[in-house]
Amino acid sequence: MIFHPAIIGLFLSSILIGFMVLYCAFYGIRIIRRWDILSGSELQLSLERRTYLISTFLSYIFGFQLLSLFLFIFTADQLHPFFVGAMCAAGSLYANSYGYPVLLLKILNFFMAGLWLILNHADNQASDYPLIRKKYIFLLVLAPFILAEAVLQAGYFIQLNPSIITSCCGTLFSAEGAGISSDIGALPGPVMKTIFFGSMTTTLATGVYYYLRGKGAWFFAGLSALNCIVCLFSILSFISLYIYELPTHHCPFCILQKEYGYIGYPLYLALFAGSILGVGVGALMPFRNIRSLSETIPATQKRMAQAAVVLLIVFAMIVAWKLIATDFILDVGH
């Protein structure tokens, strides 16, 4: 194990988050079984006080969960000098078998935690907490993934060995290499450009239409999820090439480094946050007919759609800026 302040911080915080999620899930089961808003019993009053405390805990926990994805990637990037062959986070994550599974779990938990926060916010808008059972059932689904992330992250940090020779991003994400990442990197640039701009334009148009007319929420949510995947593929296929101004450098991690102005952080943050908000618009649709939420949820969805569109425009503008401002020309064969 490498002793590094960021490693110790993430290691301890993941253990704390795991215990807190278990604590909240334990009381969540009681709330799911015993909650009765029409009852004035001592048990119900106790549950109401408890759920306020738990919701506050979870809001901070899942807020940090969102932040921890970027902290983890930043830490992995800071560790690359410890490993022979590593040039960025790509090599650090490849240093043992836990690295990339942890990253994938963190991305999944980033989206699920974001959706839980959206559901919790909507529930707190009504005095009768109509979504109380649903958000705690969702918590029970989310808890094993949070715990699995904590275990795998601990395994990753504990198994880090500076004597290991790892691979660089040029090998892992080379279009000539083997594996899924290489296959994505080998996708034709001109074709991916067309798909990217088509997907982004359609998603933005659907979001604006929902904001103006209040229709097409499910369509916007589905396109937001699909567009996120298209954007990630596009980063590997051609966007990274314009940032690096190199025809063979497809790494999605080097764009997080100082040499490239840390441009990857606003790029990924805008994409992920915008996608979560877009999906969240659809996730709230089943609850619009609940009487106590019939006015607040449509207003919340409208604000979320507006924020999602703004964030995706920020992402698209960063990409367009890099495509226009550089003298790099993508070869048709790429």
Image (cartoon, helix red, strand yellow):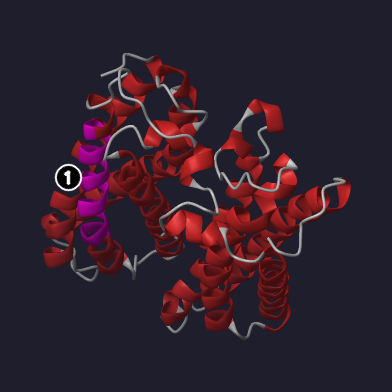
> Which quadrant holds the N terminus?
top left
Residue 303: where, in percent of width, then height?
A: 64, 64
| Crowding near the residue tagged with mark 1, few <14, some 14–19, many ≥20 C-alpha atoms within 10 Å | some
Instruction: Decide which of 333, 249 is in the foreground and name it.
Output: 333
Task: Work out whether residue 82 can be spotted.
Answer: yes
Residue 8: where, in percent of width, then height?
A: 32, 20
Q: Is residue 219 left or right of residue 44?
A: right
Which residue is rendered at x = 20% and y = 53% of the image? 144
Whether residue 293 appears in magenta in the rendering, the answer is no
How would you classify the magenta stretch by its main secondary structure?
A: helix
Q: Secondary structure at mark 1?
A: helix
Instruction: Decide which of 310, 316 is in the foreground and name it.
Output: 316
Q: Magenta stretch?
A: 139-155
| Vertical placement of residue 12 versus 226, above or below | above
Residue 181: where, in percent of width, then height?
A: 47, 55
| Vertical placement of residue 141 versus 14, above or below | below
Q: Is residue 308 left or right of residue 71?
A: right
Q: Tell me the residue that label 1 is attached to.
A: 22
> Which quadrant holds the C terminus?
bottom right
Q: Is residue 136 left or right of residue 214?
A: left
Instruction: Decide which of 307, 11 is in the foreground and name it.
Output: 11
Task: Identify residue type, mark 1.
Answer: Leu
